[in-house]
Image (cartoon, rainbow, N blue to C red):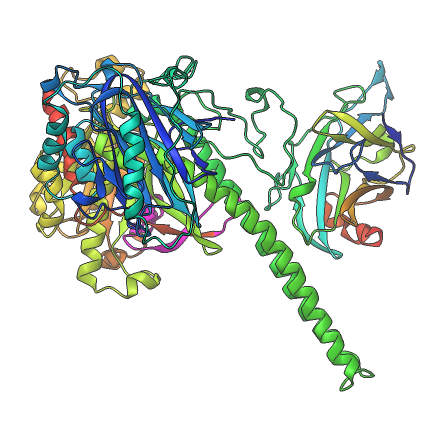
């Protein structure tokens, strides 16, 4: 049976000799890149494209065409290859074609085994101005291969796609690849089958060194029908019944929400209405998780609820495990005590036997509890693997390729990701920490040592720098999550100590004004925001929002305070406290970067301020509790990939959109 | 089809046709006894609270009641406090859902109790019952109706406990006194 994948979903591959059929309805170029374990493409020789169509185990067509067959032999690819990305690109205006996937039919890709039986298929919906897309990924997972539906488009075309995979000089590379298909305009169908089979045979010697003693590679049987009519039919109903009112607010939301997704969840039965009461699944075989299978009006909301559902599930399964371990421990203690108090048995062999039995009972219970925990963790990890790639920018990690396709949203954001949370039971299972917008309380990035181990290893200067960096990243994400001009950022940096870290915000021009310097600058900004809060509160209380001055900026405001309490006099501190208390309800929010020690001179006066803020840390720290059980969760701040330009790139788009709207 | 249980009776919680149940609902209901008043019959609101206590080898591990509606492990859920009672004729006033397959491995008994928060005795309550329902299809598996009320403020209704790899329900029907489940602990312990 063919699995119809949705974006982000994966599927096991039962066979290593595969054919990938592409049906685009218009000429496209098909290629493949081979990535190492780090997800990088080490060099040009790891790309299969029309100019260089054969790599060990991978063959791609030489021409741009509407229909393609790529042959892949996963046993023949070098051992260092951990991922094969199948990419499609529009050949560009030189061939007289379109430059946007949005103007043509959604490309359809199918993975079939070597005798043509379809394994999985995927329709790449939701593309717009992108001209290149990573369609699928074949990747190694614990010794076997899986396929994942990617649908990751690039507005910057093939060059942006290749650059994202770590290749150097991607623009030149992309140009040379496109040049290979440019001279002779491609026929609409692909006359590729016989040469393809030959290429497979040709590549066989290259794989001879591969130790796998498999049968000689035979050419995949080629159906007599030229272009394979079966593969040309797009899957029905894809994206046609998407109940997404916020469609178009985010590329990933609209692209991921299409498709016949079963929104029922095997365990979360809070929304029985959405599940047409299927026969209860046997628990031994939990169905494969699907991104967005929680309830909600939009894909963002469904993903948000799904992430919170995973958060709760992880908290509760860990609670069950810890409770069982505690009980086993206390029972062991009691039983050991009993053997000690039993005078008759003391010193005799019976005593030892009783202790051994008690230990065995303890171990047996812990082992059973661990089994249950591992089963749950595996299921959550599988869910996380599907959910992470499907997340929209505001919820996504910075290394998620969705940031490369960032567009300024049209609608108000629902939530943002402030970091990751995990428990010691499985540190690699990270739950996105999603916080609803508008923020109900201010944020505080703690630049002090606190009790955190990780912070203790860093020197003070480095810690402060990291704190400001992560505050800048939070700010950038908040800016990116809001529609153009709907989020205004003020920065207070009294001594100018944060100039270097604040540069991305300053230089891209997303700030309302340059960072305020000195005591005068601080009080001016605070006064302006305090007045705004007063004004809005008065209008709100009087129910006369139309009485506000006509020029009043309706955007939400964020005040980033660095170096507190440097440059703050008593009056400024009072105003800051006022903003922290009264601001959130009228759209004025605080983001403090501070070490509580620095402000110790104020004594307990500031305690309510610190308590009212959501404390985040620039380094991993376990200070956050979940609302259900109260475990201590390890918080990790969002990390920008080293050397990545994504932050500035996103901010530049935000700034361009602001200026476009006249802000 | 439902089994009408008597005090001390036990039934095995299995699906008809074999296999183990996953979700069961322990429904508890009661009605206020009619009282003679100046203007004929009057009834009075009775606030009974259902609780479930999770035991591991006779030690209480977790309690689900109106202030802690979900056990930490998520396997036992209270659907919420009902302050009045007797709403439906024979329907559940409060219900506690148990996901038998997610009950932590060390929990071997779950005891269900009902106690009167307002201090009224069971003399003022009639038709108190507990019933266990298969959540998957809404079918009632067993029902235990209490005998006439007496001068006490709590009832230890039933327990659900592990037997081999499955679960069993035992009707307890033991009167006790107490405002909340903490007061009932000494009365519960002999039934474990």
Total numbered badges shown on the rendered structure: 0
Compared to A45, does A113 lie above or below? above
Compared to B131, does A469 lie above or below? below
Left/right placement of residue B4 relative to residue B49 reads right
The residue shown at (43%, 27%) is A116
A630 part of magenta stretch: yes
Residue A444 percent coordinates (x, y)? 28, 47
Compared to A312, does B123 lie above or below? above
Instruction: Report the magenta residues as a range.
Output: A606-631
Q: Is residue A651 visible?
A: yes
Question: Which of the 4 image quadrants contains residue B117?
Answer: top right
A148 part of magenta stretch: no
Viewport quadrant of the C terminus of chain A: top left
Residue A107 percent coordinates (x, y)? 31, 20
The residue shown at (75%, 74%) is A354
Compared to A657, does A166 lie above or below? below
Residue B4 percent coordinates (x, y)? 89, 30
Q: Is residue A398 visible?
A: no
Residue B123 percent coordinates (x, y)? 87, 32
Residue at the bottom extreme? A347
Q: Nearer the viewer, residue B127 or A132?
A: A132
Left/right placement of residue A422 relative to residue A255 reads right
Left/right placement of residue B83 relative to residue A539 reads right
Q: Nearer the viewer, residue A386 or A356?
A: A386
Q: Nearer the viewer, residue A527 or A96?
A: A96
The residue shown at (62%, 54%) is A369
């Amino acid at each position: 049976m063919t699995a119809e994948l949705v974006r982000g979903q994966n599927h096991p591959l039962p066979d290593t000799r595969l054919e990938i059929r592409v049906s685009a309805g218009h000429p496209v170029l098909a290629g493949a890149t081979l990535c190492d374990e780090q997800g990088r493409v080490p060099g040009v020789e790891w790309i299969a494209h029309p100019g260089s169509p054969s790599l060990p185990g991978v063959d791609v067509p030489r021409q741009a065409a509407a229909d393609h067959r790529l042959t892949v032999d996963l046993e023949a690819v070098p051992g260092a290859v951990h991922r094969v990305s199948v990419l499609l690109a529009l050949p560009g205006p030189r061939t007289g074609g379109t430059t946007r996937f949005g103007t043509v039919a959604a490309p359809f890709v199918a993975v079939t085994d070597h005798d043509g039986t379809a394994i999985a298929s995927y329709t790449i919906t939701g593309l717009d101005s992108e001209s290149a897309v990573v369609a699928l990924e074949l990747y190694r997972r614990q010794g076997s291969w899986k396929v994942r539906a990617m649908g990751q488009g690039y507005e910057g075309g093939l060059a942006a796609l290749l650059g994202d995979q770590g290749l150097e000089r991607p623009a030149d590379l992309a140009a040379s690849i496109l040049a290979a298909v440019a001279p002779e305009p491609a026929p609409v169908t692909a006359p590729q089958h016989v040469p393809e089979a030959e290429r497979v045979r040709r590549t066989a010697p290259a794989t001879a060194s591969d130790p796998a003693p498999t049968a000689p590679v035979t050419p995949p049987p080629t159906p007599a029908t030229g272009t394979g009519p079966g593969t040309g039919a797009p899957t029905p109903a894809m994206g046609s019944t998407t109940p997404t009112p916020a469609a178009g607010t985010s590329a990933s939301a609209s692209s991921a929400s299409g498709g016949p997704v079963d929104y029922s969840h095997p365990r979360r039965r809070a929304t029985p209405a959405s599940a047409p009461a299927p026969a209860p699944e046997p628990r031994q075989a939990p169905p494969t998780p699907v991104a967005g299978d929680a309830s909600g009006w939009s894909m963002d909301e469904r993903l948000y609820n799904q992430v919170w559902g995973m958060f709760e599930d992880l908290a509760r399964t860990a609670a069950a495990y810890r409770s069982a371990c505690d009980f086993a421990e206390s029972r062991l203690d009691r039983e050991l005590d009993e053997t000690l108090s039993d005078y008759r048995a003391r010193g005799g062999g019976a005593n030892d036997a009783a202790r051994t039995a008690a230990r065995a009972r303890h171990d047996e219970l812990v082992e059973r509890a661990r089994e249950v925990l591992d089963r749950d963790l595996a299921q959550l990890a599988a869910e996380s693997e599907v959910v992470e790639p499907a997340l929209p920018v505001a919820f996504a990690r910075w290394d998620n390729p969705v940031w490369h396709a960032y567009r300024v949203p049209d609608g108000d954001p629902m939530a943002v990701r402030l970091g990751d949370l995990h428990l010691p039971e499985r540190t690699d299972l990270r739950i996105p920490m999603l916080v609803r917008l508008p923020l109900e309380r201010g944020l505080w990035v703690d630049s002090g040592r606190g009790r955190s181990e990780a912070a203790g290893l860093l020197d003070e200067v480095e810690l402060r720098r990291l704190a400001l960096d992560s505050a800048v990243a939070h700010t950038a994400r908040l800016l990116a999550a809001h529609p153009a001009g709907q989020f205004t950022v003020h920065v207070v940096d009294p001594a100018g100590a944060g100039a270097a870290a604040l540069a991305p915000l300053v230089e891209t021009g997303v700030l309302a004004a340059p960072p305020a310097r000195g005591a005068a600058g601080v009080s001016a900004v605070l006064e302006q925001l305090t007045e705004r809060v007063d004004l809005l509160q008065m209008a709100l209380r009087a129910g006369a929002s139309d009485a506000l001055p006509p020029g009043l900026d309706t955007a939400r405001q964020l005040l980033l305070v660095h170096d507190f309490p440097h440059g703050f006099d008593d009056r400024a501190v009072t105003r800051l406290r006022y903003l922290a208390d009264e601001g959130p309800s009228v759209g004025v929010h605080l983001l403090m970067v501070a070490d509580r020690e620095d402000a110790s001179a104020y004594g307990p006066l500031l305690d309510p301020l610190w308590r009212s803020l959501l404390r985040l840390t620039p380094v991993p720290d376990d200070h956050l509790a979940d609302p259900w059980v109260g475990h201590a969760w390890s918080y990790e701040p969002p990390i920008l990939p080293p050397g990545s330009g994504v932050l500035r790139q996103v901010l530049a788009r935000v700034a361009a959109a602001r200026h476009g709207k006249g802000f | 089809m439902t089994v009408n249980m008597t005090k001390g009776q036990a039934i095995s919680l299995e699906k008809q046709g074999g296999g183990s149940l996953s979700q069961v609902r322990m429904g508890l209901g009661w009605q206020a006894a009619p009282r003679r008043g100046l203007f004929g019959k009057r009834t009075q609101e009775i606030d009974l609270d259902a609780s479930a206590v999770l035991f591991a080898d006779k030690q209480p591990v977790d309690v689900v009641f109106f202030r802690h509606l979900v056990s930490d492990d998520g396997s036992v859920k209270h659907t919420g406090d009902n302050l009045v009672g007797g709403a439906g004729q024979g329907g559940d006033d409060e219900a506690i859902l148990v996901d038998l397959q997610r009950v932590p491995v060390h929990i071997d008994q779950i005891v269900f109790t009902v106690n009167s928060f307002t201090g009224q005795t069971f003399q003022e309550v009639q038709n108190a019952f507990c019933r266990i329902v298969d959540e998957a299809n809404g079918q009632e598996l067993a029902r235990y109706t209490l005998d006439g009320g007496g001068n006490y403020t709590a009832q230890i209704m039933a327990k659900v406990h592990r037997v081999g790899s499955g679960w069993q329900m035992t009707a307890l029907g033991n009167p006790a006194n107490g405002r909340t489940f903490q007061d009932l602990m000494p009365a519960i312990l002999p039934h474990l």
